[in-house]
Amino acid sequence: MAQPAIKLLEEMEPEVDAALAIDRNHLARMTYGDRSLERELLELFDRQAAILLARMRTADAASVAALAHTLRGSALGVGASRVAQAAAAVEAAGDAAEREPAVDHLAVSVAGARTCIATLLRAV
């Protein structure tokens, strides 16, 4: 029997260091070092990630994939690579048995990124 593409939530590594959830160097390159733009992008991503994740919990399979694709692009823009990787896994999930744990893993990654963003926003 083939191994599932997505690990069970219990098997996944926890988001051990939320401070690493946003690549500050990438974000600085994307904003040309403009701290107010960094703040604006982080605030937008924070809100969008929460909204998209909540919508994924109640959406049909095609909509979940589209929402994950949107979140993946946004995550790449702000340097949230763990969120982008988790969103890609949701996007690629074949059925509900793969999709549900993938969305759970995405939720963990989003939580880590949002924790990091809260810390960064206090500093920016």
Image (cartoon, rainbow, N blue to C red):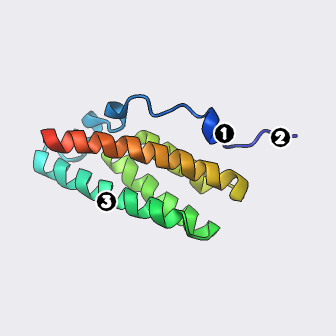
Distance between mark 3 and mark 2 Cα atoms = 38 Å
The image position of residue 22, as x and y in percent, is 32, 39
What residue sits 43% from the left and 62% below the top? Answer: 52
| Label 1 element class | loop
Mark 2: amino acid: Ala
The image position of residue 11, as x and y in percent, is 63, 33
Decide which of 74, 17 is in the foreground and name it: 17
Q: Is residue 71 above or below residue 123?
A: below
Residue 90, which numbered label? Answer: none
Q: Earlier in the sequence, mark 1 or mark 3?
A: 1
Q: Which residue is most to the right?
A: 1
Picture quarter containing residue 60?
A: bottom right
Q: Which residue is mark 3?
A: 47
Picture quarter containing residue 82?
A: top left
Specify few, some or many for label 1: CA neighbours under 10 Å numbering under 14, 14-19, or 20 or more: few
Count of all numbered marks drawn on residues in the image: 3
Disc 3 or disc 2, which is closer to the eye?
A: 3
What residue sits 19% from the left and 55% below the top? Answer: 40
What residue sits 70% from the left and 59% below the top? Answer: 96
Distance between mark 1 and mark 3 Cα atoms = 27 Å
Q: Quadrant of the N terminus?
A: top right
Specify few, some or many for label 3: CA neighbours under 10 Å numbering under 14, 14-19, or 20 or more: few
Does residue 72 appear to the left or right of 117 in the view shown? right
Residue 2, which numbered label? Answer: 2
Decide which of 78, 99 is in the foreground and name it: 99
The image position of residue 55, as x and y in percent, is 48, 67
| Label 2 element class | loop
Residue 7, which numbered label? Answer: 1
Q: Is residue 88 above or below residue 50?
A: above
